[in-house]
Amino acid sequence: MVVEKAENALRLSALDRKASALGLSIGQPLADARAMLPELKVMAANEPADLKLLERIADWCERFTPYVALQPPRSLLLDVTGVAHLFGGEEALIDTIRERLRKQGLIVRGALAGTSLAARALARYRDGTVAPPGEDGRAIAPLPVEALDFDPETTHALRHAGLKTIGQVASRKRAELTARFGAGFVFALDAAFGRAEKPVSPRNPLPDYRTERNFAEPVTSEEIIRATLKSLAGALAQVLEKNGEGARRLGAVFFRADGAVARLAIETGAPTRDSAMIERLFREKLKSLADPLDPGFGFDLIRLSAGRTQKSESIAAELDADANAQKEIRYLIDRLAARFGAHRILAFRPNDTHIPEAAWMAQPAQYAEDSKIEWKRIRREKESPRRPLRFFAKAEPAAMLPSHLRWRSVARALAAREGPERIAMEWWRHQAPARDYYCAEDDEGRRYWLYRSASDLPQWFVQGLFA
């Protein structure tokens, strides 16, 4: 038995079948339970661990449908619309799910109905039931009012009024129920009977397209896994080409025979449906994993999905065009991003400002768009660079003397100094004073780019270093 603190008292939050048979119930105070069973053994609830286990079960259930929603603390909702025939029908599907989860050591109750509330009620009180289409109301009518999981006060009020079953509640007039229990109660009742819809959000975004392969025997060979990804990429590319689309995000899901699930995802800078490119990008992703993909006892299902799809028309490039070169550059960026992460592969774009630290910005190269602003050339032919190669993210304070520069607690003797170059701040954006920039060189040949603020109390800062 599991207990948790609620309403300033320890109460039972989970029971096994033996405890239920002895008359204990969820929500019962622990003191009352011990009075009935002095030898009762309990353990404290661990909500984070319970949620983590529920999420692992939800991952495993995605082998049946990608539409899996969490209903904590101990329920899952699977939308199996249109997929039951893949598993031999609705009865076979619900039996397969229950049987496989029980083999993992879990106590499972499940049911299938046209509405989520009806399915949950049937799972609690009619384990294994499959409600015929359009007959959810008839299936749940004999169930006790507790099946709809209303709050204890509402359930007590219903029983006190002599309404012990869902059918008896549904037979009363809506105006009467609304006046007594509120519009939310009536809406939940309508949702259970299929007269209203209660939206349920899946825990993971649904892919635009997906393809998968089941294995009669779990596979562990890396060659087979790669060959499967290549085959799935080809099948997915055909679907995308048929619809004239390309994918910006692709995901691979590996379902292990022991219930564990591994996920990989790649993104591309442009919509693609090139199966060879997709397979190579996943190969790069597999090589970059700090924790290699562990097949364990083997994968019995591998799924490949496409998301963030966009229209992508095939364009035949001319022989003298640089379209192929641009394509190779984008592919190189995608490969580097797959291996090192998109946030590490950056592209620089100019900004419409003359302030040095804001004259450019770095964006992930996969998502960087061509800028309408062109880079400004400030260096004349055969002239030494006017801007440093190493530019500090934040200017560092320094002290300037007639013949020395003190920076980072070190005094450096200056051999030459050139300047100033005045750069005024944009008054409509910044309230800072103008800056006078200098190029300075010490006696060891190191060159600095530093400035002095043109204010009443001028201060010196080092902005960057030349090569």
Image: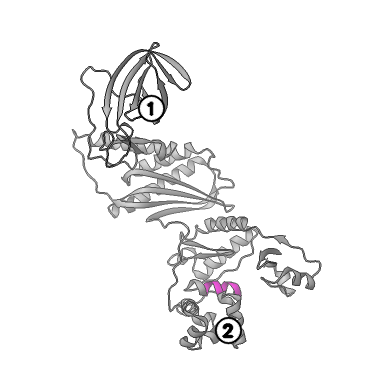
- Going 61% across and 84% down the picture, which residue do you hit? 159
- Going 31% across and 41% down the picture, which residue do you hit? 368
Q: Nearer the viewer, residue 365 or 392?
A: 392
Q: Is residue 328 magenta?
A: no
Secondary structure under badge 1?
A: loop
- Going 45% across and 79% down the picture, which residue do you hit? 134
* Residue topped by disc 1: 459
Is 436 placed left or right of 258 in the picture? left
Q: Nearer the viewer, residue 269 or 450?
A: 450
Is 364 placed left or right of 315 in the picture? right
Where residue 374 sits: x, y (%)? 22, 35
User: Which stretch is magenta?
Assistant: 118-125
What kind of residue is marked 1?
Gln
**Crowding at mark 1 (Cα within 10 Å: few <14, some 14-19, many 20+):** some
Is 114 placed left or right of 437 in the picture? right
Q: CA distance from mark 1 to mark 2?
A: 81 Å
Front label number (1 vs 2): 1
**Crowding at mark 2 (Cα within 10 Å: few <14, some 14-19, many 20+):** some
What kind of residue is marked 2?
Thr
Q: Which quadrant would the N terminus be assigned to in this image?
A: bottom right
Where residue 180 sits: x, y (%)? 52, 84
Q: Nearer the viewer, residue 95 or 199?
A: 199
Q: Is residue 124 magenta?
A: yes
Disc sitting over residue 165 in the figure = 2
Is 279 placed left or right of 437 in the picture? right
- Going 64% across and 64% down the picture, which residue do you hit? 107
On the image, which quarter does residue 22 sit in?
bottom right
